[in-house]
């Protein structure tokens, strides 16, 4: 390892090679350097210490070394051993060198000639000191990582708490609105019944209103239950043969009677061919219902909603496009997170922020993907990509079977199913069985 080696700079005579040989003889890695520039490069790669002769630090070399030592990280204090010369000239040079290095270096000065045992002792001390420095570095970095993780965990906990609080506020509002209507109408009808003034025509209108809000409550509760099932891993899929055009037609007919659909809306299905695959019908219905309802909801002034179905080889693409409010770019990354709301102002759009999360999870469990492209104020496109035969059961290879093996009697039978989509109540019952 580079951090376990000792660098040697003794460019004159055979001192460097002799010292390197002695260190290698006792199992200490050592590298001889030609000049101070090579020393500085090797120090950047990692070193346990530096043996350097006094004459190698003449001129600007000492200042260059000091400059590098000044830039060491807080944990690092690389050990130096300077081998001093003899005579008055050497003594004067040594004194100048000591002043230059000053307190910037962890330095030991040895007079030459130096005993072998003294050199080995200095080398061993270097390694021991440097190892402790690396241990300190590792502790510092581990502490920094632990602090970062703690900070991230705290931030995630705070974000989760904020999301929970926002969701509780939104959910309570969304639940309270239909409950208030139901309770108000029920109390009014009860009073009229007690007084004998119950108007059957008014009663029918109020019952329709009660049914609408009861359905809204049912959807809210089902979304909450589905979220819990998803997070507990209890969503079970039941693959069956599905005519996608028939399923989409049924979804559109149903959403046309929802509060999100207004007179200014138009919904169009584009499909160039019949598409039949193997998916969980009720769950795919749930995905389509959410995407189309969202397209209507986020187009409060009306506009065109397009559902485009396309089969390519062994996959199918479902694109739902609207011309509505669009989504701000900074909100897109959180779009499929639970309780995330694109528009926080409930006066614009209501909802709990669970629909897209549930839809994305259901698509993922069909081994598909869901993506979104949007421009604020111009509209949004959601694209669902699914295998034609979803890999649902454990051990399933996902191989697409010939259509005859799917049990389809004829093309006419498939077309007939377009005119007879499965009733919505049957799909909801299937959803509850899955839970």
Image (spheres, rainbow, N blue to C red):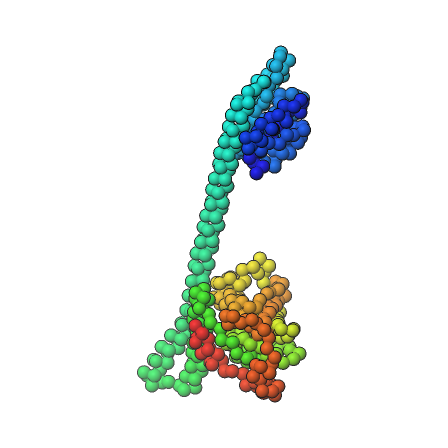
* Residue drawn at the location 44% of the way across and 54% of the way down: 157
Q: Nearer the viewer, residue 300 or 97?
A: 97
Q: Residue at x 55, y 35 (%)?
A: 4
Q: How many marks?
A: 0
Question: Where is residue 93 drawn, in percent x and y?
Answer: 63, 16
Question: Which residue is located at x 51 percent, y 29 percent?
Answer: 124
Q: Is residue 114 left or right of residue 166?
A: right
Residue 422 showing in the rendered view? yes
Q: Residue 108: percent from the left, percent from the top?
A: 54, 23
- Residue at (55%, 79%) from the top-left corner? 242
Comparing 29 with 238, the one in front is 29
Name which quarter of the figure residue 270 lies in.
bottom right
Q: Position of residue 9 (x, y in %)?
A: 63, 27
Q: Is residue 255 visible?
A: no
Q: Quadrant of the N terminus?
A: top right
Question: Looking at the picture, does residue 301 appear above or below residue 9?
Answer: below
């Amino acid at each position: 390892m580079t951090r376990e080696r000792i660098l040697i700079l003794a460019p004159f005579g055979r001192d460097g090679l002799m010292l390197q040989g002695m260190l290698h003889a006792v199992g200490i890695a050592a590298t001889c350097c030609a000049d101070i520039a090579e020393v500085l490069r090797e120090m950047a790669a990692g070193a346990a210490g530096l043996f350097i002769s006094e004459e190698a630090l003449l001129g600007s070399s000492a200042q260059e070394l000091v400059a590098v030592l000044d830039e060491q990280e807080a944990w690092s204090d690389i050990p130096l051993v300077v081998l001093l010369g003899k005579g008055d000239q050497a003594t004067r040079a040594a004194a100048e060198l000591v002043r230059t290095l000053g307190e910037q270096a962890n330095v030991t000065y040895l007079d030459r000639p130096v005993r072998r045992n003294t050199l080995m002792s200095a080398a061993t001390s270097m390694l021991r000191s440097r190892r402790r420095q690396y241990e300190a570095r590792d502790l510092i970095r581990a502490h920094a990582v632990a602090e970062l993780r703690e900070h991230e965990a705290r931030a995630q906990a705070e974000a989760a708490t904020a999301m929970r609080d926002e969701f509780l506020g939104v959910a309570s509002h969304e639940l309270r609105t239909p409950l208030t209507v139901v309770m108000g109408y029920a109390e009014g009808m009860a009073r009229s019944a007690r007084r004998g003034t119950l108007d059957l025509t008014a009663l029918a209108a109020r019952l329709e209103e009660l049914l609408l809000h009861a359905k809204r409550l049912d959807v809210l509760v089902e979304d909450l239950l589905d979220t819990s099932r998803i997070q507990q891993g209890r969503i079970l899929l039941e693959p069956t043969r599905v005519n996608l055009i028939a399923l989409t037609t049924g979804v559109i007919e149903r959403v046309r009677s929802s509060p999100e659909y207004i007179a200014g809306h138009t919904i169009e299905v584009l499909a160039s061919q019949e598409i039949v695959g193997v998916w969980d019908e009720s769950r795919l219905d749930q995905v389509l219902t959410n995407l189309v309802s969202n397209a209507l909801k986020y187009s409060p002034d009306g506009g065109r909603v397009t559902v485009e179905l396309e089969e390519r080889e062994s996959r199918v693409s479902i694109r739902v496009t609207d011309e509505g409010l669009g989504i701000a770019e900074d909100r897109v990354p959180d779009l499929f997170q639970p309780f995330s709301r694109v528009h926080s102002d409930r006066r614009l759009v209501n909802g709990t922020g669970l629909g897209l999360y549930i839809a994305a999870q259901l698509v993922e469990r069909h081994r598909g993907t869901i993506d979104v492209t949007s421009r604020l104020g111009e509209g949004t496109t959601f694209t669902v990509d699914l295998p034609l035969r979803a890999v649902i059961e454990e051990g399933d290879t996902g191989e697409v079977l010939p259509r005859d093996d799917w049990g389809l009697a004829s093309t006419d039978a498939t077309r007939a199913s377009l005119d007879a989509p499965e009733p919505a109540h049957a799909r909801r019952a299937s959803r509850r069985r899955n839970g």
